[in-house]
Image (tube, rainbow, N blue to C red):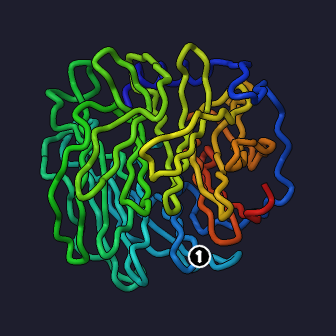
Amino acid sequence: MPRKILLVALCATALVSVATYRSVRISAEVAPVAAAIDSIASPAAPGSAEPNLAVAPDGRVYMSWLEPAGSGHALRFAILNGRKWSAARTIRAGSDFFVNWADFPSIKVIDKGRLAAHWLQRNGSGTYAYGVRISQSSDGGKTWGTPVTPHRDSSQTEHGFVAMWREKDKLGAVWLDGRKFKKEGHNASNEMLLLSTTIDSRGTLGVEERLDERTCDCCQNSAALTDEGPIVAYRNRSADEIRDIYVTRRVAGRWTEGAPVHADTWKIAACPVNGPSVAASGKRVALAWFTAAGDSARVKVAFSEDAGAKFGAPIRVDGGVPAGRVDVALLNDGSALVSWIERIGGDTAAVRVRRVRRDGKVGAALTIARSSAARASGFPRMTVTASDVVFAWTVPGRPSSIRVARASAGGF
C-alpha cells in the first residue's frame, strides 16, 4: 500500500470514541484476559506471518500461512486435530509471491479430500502488479494441481483481496480487480472492480461476473454461503467518497445490486485497509465491520435472519479505541463472536473478542493476546468448530511468528 494511504488509514483508526450505541456503554476499557484460552504450539517456522483459518465439515481446522523459503516464500498449511498439528506441507514455493500484511493467502475445504488455496503472484515490475492464483488438491493436500487465474484481465495492476466459498461441487471466488487503473498505484481517478467466478474440480472457470463497478481500493472482501446462496460483503466507494459496507447476494442465479448494511456515511478520501467479515448458518447471517464515520472509530456487528436481504440495527462491540481488523463467526446457538484489534496505548494493542447473542445482548470483551496496532501484526483470524474456537495471529518481530490458541465455544 502507498505510504500516504497507510498514514490516512492509521490516523482514521486511532480516533477515540466514548459514545453510547444501542444501549451499550462503550469506554476505553481494560478487558480481562480470557481464562479459558489454551495456547497451542504453532506449526509455522520463525519468520512466518499472515495466518488464515478454515474448518472442514468433520471439524478439523486448517491453517495456511507464508514463511520464508530461500530467496522467496512458501505457502504452507497444517491440520489441527485436537491440540496437535499435522506435519506442515507446502502448497507452493517461489520468489514471485506478492507478500502484503493486508492482502494474504487462504485455504478452503471444498469436500472430503478436496482443498483449494489462493495466493498472489507478481505479473510485472510495478510495485502493485500482481494477480490471483488458485490451486486445488484432490488428495488432502499431498499434491496440488496447476494453478488457475480466476480473472480474465492480465494487466499489470492489482488483483487480490480474494474470498472463496464452497458451493456444492464448485469453488466460488470473489476479488478486487484493477483493470480500470491507468497507471501504477492508487489514484482518485482510478477505480477497483468487484468480480466473481466459479471453478470446478478440473480447474475450469465459470462466467466472470461484475458485482460492483467501484469499490474501496484495498479493503478485504468476505463471503459466506447461506441456504439461499452466497453472500459477499465488501467496502463500497461512492462518487463522493462514502466508503460504507455493502453486501451482494446471488439469488436465483443472479447477483443482486450491492446494498449498504448500514448507513455509516463514512467519508474518507483514501482506503482505510479495513474490510468486513461475514458468517452464515442457514438463513442467519452475522456481519462485522470497522468504521470511523464522524471521527469516531467503531467496530459493529449486525444480524440478518433472511440470508442477508435485510440487516437489523448494528451493535457496537469495541472498547473505545479500536484499530479494526475484524473477524466474525457464528456459534451453534445463533450468537456471534466478533474479534478485533483494540489499541491500548501507542502501538500496543490487544486481540479482543466479544460474544453478541441473538437478542442483541453483548458479553464481556475478553483479551485473547497482547498484540500491536502496527500493520506488521496483520489481521487476526478466528474459526469455530462444533465445540471450540481457534484463533491465529501474527506476532511482529525479527523474526515474526504465528501464535495459535483454542478455547471452548461455550466459554464466552
279, above or below 74, in the image: above
Q: Position of residue 178 (x, y in %)?
A: 22, 37
Q: Position of residue 266 (x, y in %)?
A: 47, 20
In percent of the image, x 21 and y 19: which residue is there? Answer: 189
Considering the image in quadrants, where does the N terminus appear? top left
* Amino acid, disc 1: Gly
One can see residue 47 in this view: yes
In percent of the image, x 35 and y 51: which residue is there? Answer: 162
281, above or below 261, in the image: below
In percent of the image, x 17 and y 41: which residue is there? Answer: 156
One can see residue 399 in this view: no
Q: Which residue is mark 1?
A: 59
Q: Give left or right: position of 150 versus 107.
A: left
Q: Give left or right: position of 21 versus 190.
A: right
SS class, disc 1: loop
Q: Give left or right: position of 219 versus 214.
A: right
CA neighbours of label 1 inside 10 A, class few (<14), some (14 to 19), many (20+): some
